[in-house]
Image (cartoon, grey):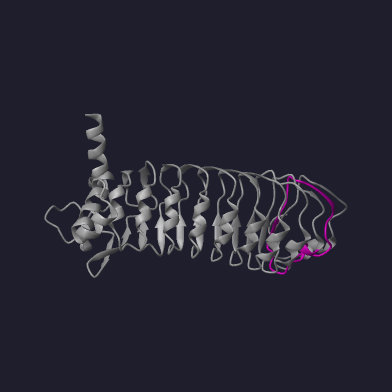
Amino acid sequence: MVCRLVILVLAAVPSTADCRRRSSSAESSALTALFDATNGAGWGNNSGWADAASTDYCSWYGVTCSSGSVTALDLSSNSLTGTIASEIACLNAVQSLDVWSNLLSGSIPSELASLTALTTDLDMGINSLSGSIPRELSSLTALTHMDLKINSLSGSIPSELSSLIVLTSLSMQTNSLSGSIPRELSSLTALTAMVLYSNSLSGSIPSELSSLIALDNLDLDTNMLSGSIPSELSSSAGLLYMYLFGNSISGTIPPSLSSLSMLQGIFLHQNLISGTIPSSLWSLADNGYLSMYSNSLSGTLALTLSPKIKLLALGNNGLSGTVPAGYATATTLQSM
């Protein structure tokens, strides 16, 4: 009896081949399964979904179609509860899936790997999803934006995600992810933002991340990272913001970071960094935010600052000497 029950449960989830054979009926069934699994009756807007007489699912709230197939599903901020139905794997033509900012729980279905037409968004941020990130998501090779932030996801970041080579934005902040940052993610050369803060990631920052030449935002703060700042990060010439604070990073600040001529903010506070602040880092033309308080830095303050400096936070270090008189004329400085 137990074996027979298991077979029935497995059979309830359509295979990819079954989805393709049944086409429109499979899409309708998939949307209905999602509605049922997420308490559709309690959604903020369920226009069309709750009407038993409405068979034109392309007219339902949040559904966009092209040539009769679902190409986008946007149910963000719509009071969805419950779990994500694995049946949505039958939405073979969907290019954008957005369930951001709801009350969804349970795990991310590995069946989402079948949604290989996803090109713009896989957005499941700000929910209560748990469990690990399915490594099967690596099959979504056309995806450009993955947002899983502010959930309760655990386990490690799958190294297999390195196959998402056109991904431009990876957001996994504020979860319970652990383990090291996979060095394989250096394959994501189209990435402009890697946002992994507020997790429990450990180990060192992979020097291979220097291959992310399109990166403008590296946000790894509030983790358990250790080791030194890789000097190779200076290869990310377009980097605008570097957030590494709230870790256990040690060693010295690489002088090579001064080659990041577009840098607008570097946040290294609350670490174990020692040595002096490289002289050229003080006066980067666009650097508006220099935050390095609560480390073990030594040396004196630079005579000149960036003309765009807005924040200078250096307290709780071992710096010596007097504050240069020129600091009084830094008209853009808002906080020191």
The residue sitting at 81% across, 62% down in the picture is 279
Tell me where residue 125 appears, x and y as whole percent: 43, 51
* Residue stretch in magenta: 280-306
Q: Is residue 302 magenta?
A: yes
Horizontal side of 105 relative to 190 (left or right) equals left
Image quarter hosting the N terminus: top left
Judge whether 131 appears above or below 52 on screen: above
The residue sitting at 75% across, 64% down in the picture is 258
Camera-side residue of 67 and 21: 21
Camera-side residue of 130 and 59: 130
Horizontal side of 91 relative to 205 (left or right) equals left
Q: Is residue 268 magenta?
A: no
The residue sitting at 79% across, 64% down in the picture is 280
User: Residue 238 occupies which quadrant of the picture?
Assistant: bottom right
Can I make out residue 294 in this image?
Answer: yes
Q: How many marks?
A: 0
The residue sitting at 61% across, 49% down in the picture is 221
User: Residue 246 occupies which quadrant of the picture?
Assistant: top right
Camera-side residue of 250 and 156: 156
